[in-house]
Amino acid sequence: MSDTVEESVVLSLDGTNSKLFPFLPYILQDIWEIGTSPETVLKLIKAHTTNYSNLRILDLGCGKGAVSVTVSKELKCQCYGIDAIEEFIEEARDKAREFNIEEYCHFECGDIRIKIHEIGSYDIIILGAIGPVLGDYYSTLTQLSNCLNEGGLVIIDDGYIDHESEYSHPSYRKKSVLLNGISDAGMTVIDEIVMENDAIKEADDIIYKGIRHRCQELIKIHPDQKSLFDDYIKQQEEENETLETEIICSTMLLSRCV
């Protein structure tokens, strides 16, 4: 495990400097749905499962619990979310109380790279826009296989480069590369929802506005760290440009090969 948990979390939120880690709760305080669309995840689950109330769902890198809370509220199923930021977990628990679903939603602060070796098996595992925290697709799915019940499903929210594109990026691969990793891990894509460009831009704009506002506040509070926050604003701008022009944003549903 080469990266620290702080480095891993910052990278998953499109940053590069681990010194940003303690400021993330402040920077993201206005945003509940940090990454994956809860409605998209819910749509895939409802389309491919039955007996919703019996489902056990593991939400890795759950952020503030938007996906778990939405799914549990709708389906009355058990969701267990893990995230490395304590303040995010506290907010997730608050949301579960707000929606009166504490009996269904359980949240814990921890390093998912360690936790996946300590927990039981689940019917659905969600990796919602957390990046390569567990490695590439082959490494990730191989590790998660021990946490997946027979007939279980994996939902991965990620972006990839169109196979006809000449574009390259250190954080994104062509879909064929991802599919090869999935296949090598003994799994296959059984459904996929691709996000429309207009929806991507709308979501990006909302998140960016909140991040920029809070970073500008932090610059006034910590002027000696101005470059840290300015760099994060710039990184968000660059990431949004990439997502809106070069990347296909997708939520894929995987199952084991029969």
Image: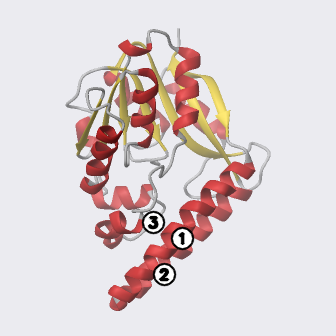
User: Where 47 falls versus 22 (above or below)?
Assistant: above
Q: Residue 108: x and y, percent? A: 23, 41
Residue assigned mark 2: 230
- Residue 65 percent coordinates (x, y): 38, 43
Q: Is residue 7 left or right of residue 136?
A: left
Picture coordinates of residue 199, whole percent (x, y): 69, 49
**Is disc 1 surrounded by few (<14), some (14 to 19) or many (20+) residues within 10 Å?**
some
In the image, taking residue 219 as reference, residue 158 lies left or right, namely: right
The residue located at (52%, 43%) in the rendering is 36
Q: Nearer the viewer, residue 257 or 222?
A: 222
Identify the disc placed on residue 30.
none
Q: Distance between the residues labelled 1 and 2?
A: 9 Å
Asked if the residue at tag 2 contacts the one at tag 3, i.e. Cβ–Cβ closer than 8 Å, the answer is no
- Callout 2: helix, strand or loop? helix
According to the image, label 1 marks what residue? 235
Quarter location, residue 151:
top left
Amino acid carrying mark 3 in the image: Gly
Alpha-carbon distance for marks 3 and 1?
A: 7 Å
Where does label 3 land, which residue?
Answer: 15
**Contact flag, marks 3 and 1 (Cβ < 8 Å):** yes
